[in-house]
Each structure stands twice: as structure tokens, then as C-alpha cells.
Amino acid sequence: MLPLIVLSLFLLPPAILAAASDDEYLKLPLLRKSPLPSPTQALALDTRRLHFLSLRRKPIPFVKSPVSSGASSGSGQYFVDLRIGQPPQSLLLIADTGSDLVWVKCSACRNCSLHSPATVFFPRHSSTFSPTHCYDPACRLVPEPSPAPKCNHTRLHSTCPYEYAYADGSSTSGLFARETATLKTSSGREANLKRVAFGCGFRISGQTASGTSFNGAHGVLGLGRGPISFASQLGRRFGDKFSYCLMDYTLSPPPTSYLTIGGARSDAVSKLSFTPLLTNPLSPTFYYVRLKSISVNGARLRIDPSVWEIDASGNGGTVVDSGTTLAFLADLAYRLVVATMRRRIRLPIAAEPTPGFDLCVNVSGVLKPEKMVPRLKFGFAGGAVFVPPPRNYFTETEEHIQCLAIQSVNPKVGFSVIGNLMQQGFLFEFDRERSRLGFSRRGCSSP
Ligand SMILES: *[C@@H]1O[C@H](CO)[C@@H](O)[C@H](O)[C@H]1NC(C)=O
Ligand SMILES: *[C@@H]1O[C@H](CO)[C@@H](O)[C@H](O)[C@H]1NC(C)=O
Ligand SMILES: *[C@@H]1O[C@H](CO)[C@@H](O)[C@H](O)[C@H]1NC(C)=O
């Protein structure tokens, strides 16, 4: 645990809410943009992201730790439509539980009519844009550019610059600021959230700058556990929890789902299975859970419990990340899963597996291949059992070829990840107040 004093020093004052009653919660439509990259591309991008995330797990002061985000991958991401500024400007952001910073592409244009709207935020068009002063304690929560600029605290207009690096070598930098966010509440009303801290990104360099790698997003909505995340800033006003359903992106038309901040959904909550959320002081952004066992067709695999633990140097453990597409398991567990699945699967093994995947099957001419795929079952601390449907872990990589969408994590550098493919079709509730994660297969159909 971090010393309490550090936490209280760096807590941001919560965003101020106008015009919503106590039992309301916020709803943001979640969507998934097509076209999607192939699973092979997703793998390359995930691996890069995870490698980068693992680099972060060093004993560095958390207030300065660089953050990564789904923006680096552009693969299989879920988006939310955020309206910020006054009057509101609508922007599409990646919903990412694996990072903290909320940021949008900003333009310092003088004549903004030359720019296409709804792809970039125009601070000049907003009456509520408020740059953070570099002497403001909030400024110490974002990674600073290097070399770090000097802060002249007697000057009135000294802004708070930040620089945010990505796994693929690209980066975004700009000014840390505050803005009004306009969100829909559960009762259909509009709620104005004042003074939401966010990064106004003026410079985006490297791959992220190109539309393809960024997949059309205009920024990232960080939902991590750090103090600057959207969830942390809004949480205390809304019972400190958020939830979402990531719908199957292969369905057509894609179903609508919501990212919900707050939680008055007692109907859904009664169906949830809970497991405690764990903290790793060396990686304070992530939502860790304690994965305890894996079963294949009901037979529990013999995996030493130590495989799942977070060790003294902060390695290991299991993270729930909406910004990673595939699932990743500690190497020992992964190899056992692959070997067992290979023995149990009732489909012809593809002679040439898709590069990057260890277990692929040929489903040519098979009517319901999902019936032939062994059932995976994940056991979590607290007795919660997660039984994903086969389409959450077997995915088409080429025509008639499906591969196990799980990868190995080197225990020396990584942690296990429950990515967004594995989460599809389940309601996930991140109950930060009670430090627990709830999930339910039946939660997504309820309103
Ligand atoms: C902004 O650009 C548009 C299009 O080029 C032009 O018509 C308009 O006069 C410009 N406005 C200002 C204030 O410069
Ligand atoms: C800080 O800003 C004030 C006011 O603009 C100025 O008088 C002073 O010289 C500045 N100090 C430094 C160290 O730049
Ligand atoms: C899959 O099986 C079909 C039918 O047996 C065969 O024609 C095809 O070549 C196989 N595809 C691959 C990629 O192995």
C-alpha cells in the first residue's frame, strides 16, 4: 500500500456536478468501430502494449509514471462519445481501463472553420476551458515533458505541459487543463460535470498520428485507478463504481451498450458474481484480480498457485483491461491450457497455424464449431467463476481457420490479462468503493 499521505496529497478535487439528482447515474453509449484489424494485427499491437505496460512496473513514484493506452494499439477497441466544452463538442474516445489519463486531440486554430469539426477539440470555442497552472498540485499527476520545463509560480499564465509516450514510439503532448463534460444521466437528463481534468493534446507524433493506427479515435478515456482517471474524478460523486458490457463486434448490426458511471442497477447487481480487486503499489493504474484456477471441460488444470501471484517486485498477477484485445496467461498456465485444449478439441488441427498463434483449427464444413471447442472455466478468489462462451477465446484468423485467442506472458516481465474479447457479452462492474469486480452473463440485456 502507498502511504496515505501521498494519496491525500495528490487527490484531485472531484468534478463538480450540476443538475442531477442523487439516485441518478451516467450513461455513455459504447461502440466498436469497424473495420477491425485482423487478430494477427491485434496480437502484434497487444504484445507491444503489454511489453510497454510491463516496462512501467518499476518502483518509480507513481505520480510521474508514464501512462500507456489503447491509443497505441488502435486494435479492437471500444469507444465512447464524450461531449466536452461549453457549448459541448463531441469526440470519440477509446474506453480504457488500462490507463489513467483522459485526453483529446486539441487544435489551437485561430480560424477553426478550416478544420473539420468533431475530430479535434477547439479550446477557443469553449467558454469553460481552463488550463491548469504548473504550480497546481494536479500538475504533478501527469508525466511532464523532458526536459522538464521550469515552473514560474509567480506568473499567472504558466500552463502545465505534459508528454505521454506510447508503446509504438509515438507520443502526444499538450496542456493539462479542465473542462466541462456533458453527459446523459439514467433519467435522460443532461448532467454538466464541471472542471474535469484532461489532457489537451496539441502534438501527436509517430504512428498514433496516422488515422489507421489510431483507428479514428480522438483521444482516450482513461478509466484506471489513478487519481486523474475519469472513473476516479467522477467516482466519488456516483458511488465510485462503473460498469460496461462489451458487445460482440461480429454481430450485425452491432448492439448498443453503455459505459455506466455509478450504479443504481440493483436488478443487474443481484446477478453479479464478485471477486476482490487487488492493488499492486508498483502498478497503481490497473485493476488486478486473483485468478486461482483454470478448468478445461470441467477438469481443473494442475497449476501451482504461485503462478498467479503478484511477486515482491510487482510482477505477475492478473489484470482486467478493456484496452487489450486478446487474453494473456502466465507462461506455465498458458502451455498447459494449449496442451489440454489440443487434446480435447474435436476439430482438425490446422496444419499451418496462423503466425503468432499456437493452436488453430480448420472449421471448414463444420456447422457449429463452437460446440466442438472445449469449455474454459476461470476460478477467481471469493468463489466467482467465469465461464466465457467459446467465441470469447476462439477467433477466426483466416477463412475457415480459428485460433485460440490467448497468448503467453513471460512471467519475468508480464502479468496475465483478461482482454476485451474475453469480456464480450458480460456485464462487468468495477466497484471501486467496495474494491471488488462483479461480472454477469445475464447483465447485458437489462437496460
Ligand atoms: C475563416 O476561414 C473562412 C474560410 O476560409 C473564411 O471565410 C473566414 O472569413 C475566416 N474567418 C476569420 C475570422 O478569419
Ligand atoms: C517569473 O515571472 C515573473 C512575472 O512574470 C517575472 O517577474 C520573474 O522574473 C519570473 N521569474 C523567473 C525565474 O523567470
Ligand atoms: C481446411 O480443410 C479443408 C477441407 O478438409 C481443406 O480443403 C482446406 O485446405 C483446409 N484449410 C487449411 C488452411 O488447412
Image: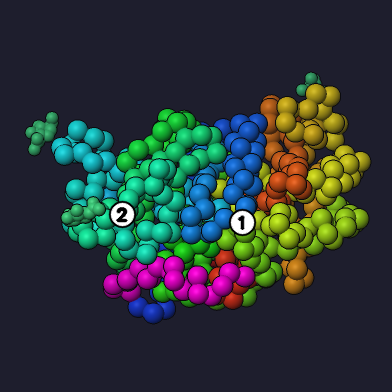
Q: Is residue 315 left or right of residue 341?
A: left
Give, as a three-letter code, the residue at label 2: Cys
Rendered image quadrant of residue 371: top right
Please provide percent x and percent y for residue 80. Answer: 43, 51
Q: Is residue 330 left or right of residue 188?
A: right
According to the picture, the residue beneath numbered tag 1 turns out to be 59
Structure colour scheme: rainbow
Q: Residue 4: say if magenta.
A: yes
**Residue drawn at 57 percent across, 66 percent down:** 430
**Residue drawn at 66 percent across, 67 percent down:** 278
Q: Secondary structure at mark 1?
A: loop
Start-end of magenta stretch: 1-20
According to the picture, the residue beneath numbered tag 2 turns out to be 151
Please provide percent x and percent y for residue 443. Answer: 60, 64
**Which is more toward the observer, 215 or 319?**
319
The reply to whether residue 400 is in sight is no
Please provide percent x and percent y for residue 106. Answer: 30, 43
**Residue drawn at 51 percent across, 34 percent down:** 169
Q: Is residue 323 left or right of residue 339?
A: left
User: Mark 1 and mark 2 in contact (Cβ < 8 Å)?
Assistant: no
Give, as a three-letter code, the residue at label 1: Pro
**Which is more toward the observer, 384 or 135?**
135
Rendered image quadrant of residue 218: top left
